Image (spheres, helix red, strand yellow):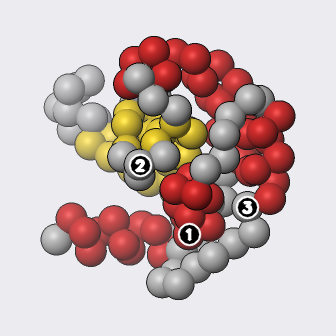
Amino acid sequence: MLIEIAKQQLQKAGWYEGRKIDVSHYEKMFTELGYEFFPAARRFLEEFGDLYINDKVKCDYIEPGCICEDESSTELKQLSYFAAVDRKRMFKKVGQKTVPVAVVRYMSIVIHISKGRKIFCK
């Protein structure tokens, strides 16, 4: 069920099976910031780059019945800030090179992918 919900949200944001966008703007930005833009990051962003999801989520931990806006993005403008400040911190945390590929703004989660295609969250 969760997989189908995720698929629906991605489709609303513009994703479709077989999607492959030009990621040269990501490569330029990451390279300028000192990242290695390795194949795993390229493949992820070719399929999921430039997507923006804005949805409502239950926030019962704030107050029962509370509904909050949640923003998730793989857009360059969202990733550029985190890419600029996270490179060395994430390497220290996981011990390998990563590239930030998505941001969940409400929870301040930055999702990174490694050369070996492992996903890390900060």
CA neighbours of label 1 inside 10 A, class few (<14), some (14 to 19), many (20+)? some
Q: Amino acid at mark 1?
A: Glu
Check disc 2 and report its element: helix, strand or loop: loop
Q: Amino acid at mark 2?
A: Gly
> What's the CA distance linking mark 2 and mark 1?
17 Å
What residue is rendered at 21% in x and 65% in y? 2
Q: Nearer the viewer, mark 2 or mark 1?
A: 2
Across and down, in percent, residue 62 comes to: 26, 23
CA neighbours of label 2 inside 10 A, class few (<14), some (14 to 19), many (20+)? few
Using the rendered view, name the quadrant where residue 83 is placed. Answer: top right
Circle 2 sits on which residue? 116
Question: Between disc 1 and disc 3, whose residue precedes?
Answer: 3
User: Do labels 3 and 2 touch, CB within 8 Å?
Assistant: no
What residue is rendered at 46% in x and 68% in y? 10
Check disc 1 and report its element: helix, strand or loop: helix
Q: Amino acid at mark 3?
A: Val
> What's the CA distance linking mark 3 and mark 2?
19 Å
**Mark number displayed over residue 23:** 3
Using the rendered view, name the quadrant where residue 86 is placed. Answer: top right
**Mark number displayed over residue 47:** 1
Q: In the rendered image, is residue 31 in sight?
A: yes
